[in-house]
Amino acid sequence: MPLPPDRVAYLPMVDRPIIRWPGNARVALWVAPNVEHYEYLPPAGVRNPWPRTPAPDVQQYSLRDYGNRVGFWRMLEVLDRYKIKCSTTLNIGVLAHFPEIAEAMLQRDWAFVNHGFYNTRYISDFSEEQEREFYFEIRESFRRLTGGREIRGQSGPAASNTERTPDLLAEAGFLYQTDWKFDDHPVPIKTRSGRFVCIPYTGELNDVPLISSHFEADYFARICKAQFDQLYKEGEENGRLMCFAIHPFVIGRPHRIKYLDEILNYIMSHDGVWQATTDEIAEYYLANYYDQAVAHAAKVNV
Amino acid sequence: MAVDRGYVVPQMRRGMDHPHHDYQPFDGRRPALRWPNGARLALCVIVNLEHVEWRQPEGSYQSPTLSGGYGNRPFPDITRWSHREYGHRVGIFRVLDVLSKHGIAPTVAMDVLTAENYPFLVRHCLGRGSEIIGHGISVSRMITNEMPEQEERDYIRTCVESLTRATGQAPKGWLGPEYGESTRTPGLLAEAGFRYVCDWVNDEQPYAMNVTRGELYALPITYPLDDVDALWDRRIDIDQYSTVLKETFDALYEDGATNGRLLALNLHPWLIGQAFRIGCLDDALGYMLSHPGVWAANGSEIIDWYAGHLPAG
């Protein structure tokens, strides 16, 4: 009997079909700004985001809101310098509350990854019907707020998921999710209704967990460059996927922004980098490698 | 409110407050241990292949501070589960490549869920000359003192049977999930045929444990270098990690000139096997192995040598 959750076939990195990215790039890079809104009065839910005081926690609320008022715009200048096409893990609420931010992202043709309405609402204890309704409403809101665009991927709000999430996402017309942080390749995810993939996000190259546990942005740059170096070396033989995740309220602080510049300057000065969006990576993988990976996994796991 | 008088004034006696081993100070009087070919230092690298369970099994014990992901999150905790799965899918191969590069045969601590569900990994580890040792059923099922004795006996037997089926050989070594033990564990391990245990991190040489049946040695892990302790719990950076690995080596190498020392490095591929971290391991092991008089060996080789050359005294 397979181990739960039985969503992925085991595929060891040393025994896999070779992935060739467009332009024969060694590394596909996606950059994930988390553009989020945390509520002033978070409703009671499966988690309390700020248990230190009864709501409102003005310090923690405004610390994050700094990202939308100030940090986002400072971050944008650096991203523009390197013409980065971001894949934002986006609280859809931001589009409604802060149309200036929506306009800036839409102008740049970023990819949008559903990160729930707000980062203070978790899907963990949704019933199947509620989760289905949630995806319907997310897609409707997204279309309405973006002039008819379609949203293709999901990063669970504050990493929350249910056991049914891949099935219901696929059923609702999503192509991918990013929550399974277990690989340096896209990974086929089994669902009731067929083809669906994970484009792995990262909890390691991620400014929030890193900088909230005693490191500063210089170390973020250090490890992002080290990650790139290793993947770039390995990607010569078999293409690799790299993600790093940033939050405007963290990386957009004055003393940190130069390290974002340092990371992008370093990576983008290399040949053989496919700086792509999650939408592009998912489509490319589904079109070229998904079937091969599924067929190969059947041979490995005997 | 008051406490018992025995709490205020505890009973004290010479030696350890448990029966599992004696107090053997590493003062100038400890007899000299000589490793093969006069090596100063034995280097053992233990690689953990452990599975965190999607849903915590009823009645089992998982450490509330289990590493990985974003810490404890509501079910399903996809972040910690997938972070750790990275080790099995990707990280392990980077770690084994680095060990091969430096001529180190790994000692792989493998749990039952890995042995039974990742046949590729079992074959791969064996193919690369690994010694496979017991590591419990899963990291979500620690042994603690609340596990009844018969349940613990069955638990250990399950591990022996499973690894024997998967590898063709009964494991000789043991590292409990999260170093977990009950007060009965050493005796039960010896009874089940184990020859050494890595849970006790209190020395720089192997030592004999007191058991009534069988023969059991401690192979003490150099705990501050355990990647989970250093890189996760204490959040030291990758450059510092490389530095403390080398500094530990330097000091043990110097001390080992008079009395052989052991450096037992405990590693988790989901952590050290991340692309940005692997270079610091490569760097530090390269440094260690550039010295003469370093014996890279697996757990059984070290314990066999120790047991066969017990220092007089």
Image (cartoon, coloured by chain):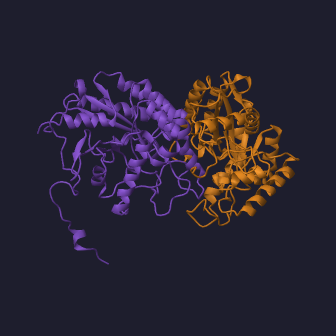
Q: Position of residue B73 (x, y in %)?
A: 57, 56
Q: Is residue A56 above or below residue A267?
A: below
Residue drawn at 42 percent across, 32 percent down:
B242
Residue reaching furthest to the left? B313
Q: Where is residue A143 in the image (x, y as percent from the top left)?
A: 85, 50
Give the quarter of the image for residue A104.
Answer: top right
Q: Is residue B312 above or below residue A21?
A: below
Q: Position of residue B89 (x, y in %)?
A: 56, 38
Q: Is residue B87 visible?
A: no
Residue drawn at 76 percent across, 59 percent down:
A132
Q: Is B200 on the left-hand or right-hand side of A122?
A: left
Q: Where is residue B114 in the image (x, y as percent from the top left)?
A: 49, 45
Q: In this view, does A29 lie above or below A61?
A: above
Residue reaching furthest to the bottom? B1
Residue sitting nearer the eye, A271 or B88: B88
Q: Is B254 on the left-hand or right-hand side of A243?
A: left
**Looking at the figure, which quarter contains the C terminus of chain B?**
top left
Q: In this view, does A144 lie above or below B5?
A: above
Give the quarter of the image for residue A244.
Answer: top right
**Chain A: colour as depicted:** orange
Q: Is A125 on the left-hand or right-hand side of B194?
A: right
**Chain B: colour as depicted:** purple
Q: Is B298 on the left-hand or right-hand side of A266?
A: left
Q: Can residue B265 be seen in this view?
A: yes
